[in-house]
Image (cartoon, rainbow, N blue to C red):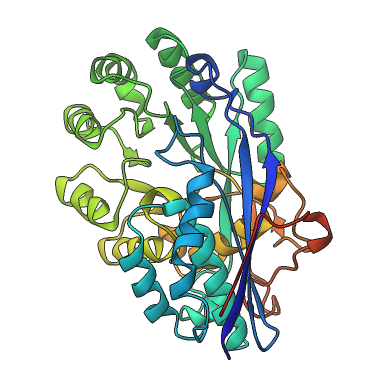
Amino acid sequence: MRISRITLFSVPVRIGMELTRYVTSQSIDPALDLLVVKIETNGGLVGWGEVVSAPPYFLPELSAGAREGIRHVSPVVLGRDPRQVTAIFQDISAALRGHGNAKTALEMALWDLAAKAHNVALVDLWGGRISKSLPIYSLIRIGTREQTLAALEAERARGVSRFQIKVGAGEPPEDVTTIRMVQEMALPHERVWYDPNRAWLVDDAMRIISAVRHLSPMIENPCETYEECRIVAKRTGVPFMLDEVIDSPRRFLEAVHDGVLDAATVKTSCIGGIEATREAISLAKILRVPLRIDDYHGTGILAACFTHLAHTLPRNLAFGLYDFVRDDIFPLVKNPLPVTAGEVRLPNDCGPGLGVEVDETLLKAPVAVLEAP
């Protein structure tokens, strides 16, 4: 059994940034695309992966870099036995530094293919599921007190109890008001955290957090750099989550050592792909750090991969998964994994690989077809 073909498809997508600081801070509206990767073997098996590269003002990447990165490493993938994934990943890593977006899509497809070659669900290839189901989280749109409460109640009615609140788009007093308002609305069993998308200066963060410290809000990645976030975490003492500054498993370990990581978000494109994410999962289990597995955006393919990944975590270390399918940027998967009562689960009979069926009729002409010689 050998990998015979890699096909790349590009689908233009639009993703709203109206809840974040970028709606006011950016004059460039980049064209985003969903890169879908299809890997085939000479025995008829197919593996699928995808990535939506973030705008270059959000993460240091371009959509074109994902395509070209995969094209660059295709010679070390084509012709290989798909069951030898560790050896393939070693060669990919040696041939391509960075390019976490390319590695996310390519490694996702290779893992899907490897699990299908073994005729097992991907989670079982990774050692089996630890959790039976996992909580999802929702982004809450902030408006008036009545509007915000209505948004919370709508998500509570779906069974959701974890909420991310975007701040940082206005002036510090506005963020103080938002945090106070939502903290008062939160129920005892709910988890709420506040994400400025790296908008705050250290000075801003100190002013805002000092005004709400008594409410013990969890703050997510308030500043641009790890060093700035570390200063804020050390000086404020509130619960702290890091996100985009976790750009490698080594940084994850450093943040735990520095005592500034109460919870972590690992974006696959940011940390370096699916393999780097699995390394972070291993660290999270050893060091007992709750983990949220995420990326900029995606469809049911990415959602399925993250669900398989997260099910290898104990429930108390799975901080939450985003329901990408609900946003429906592109209905590529015919049978997305079910979300019920605020929980996503892997059915016992989900099938081999990712366990989802891709509707290929929605994909237009490929942007690249790479074949083994």
Image check: 302 left or right of 201?
A: right
Question: In this picture, is 86 found above or below 240?
Answer: below
x and y, in percent, of residue 203 in the image:
24, 15
Residue closer to the observer: 136 or 83: 83
Residue closer to the observer: 228 or 74: 74
Residue closer to the observer: 163 or 7: 7
Residue 286: name its quadrant: bottom left
Quadrant of image for the C terminus: bottom right
Q: Residue at x 58, y 91 (%)?
A: 1
x and y, in percent, of residue 221 in the image:
35, 34
Q: Residue at x 44, y 41 (%)?
A: 61
x and y, in percent, of residue 2 in the image:
56, 87
**Does residue 158 show up?**
no
Q: Residue at x 51, y 39 (%)?
A: 54
Q: Residue at x 50, y 51 (%)?
A: 66
Question: In this picture, is 178 found above or below 105?
Answer: above
Image check: 328 left or right of 25?
A: right
x and y, in percent, of residue 137 in the image:
57, 44
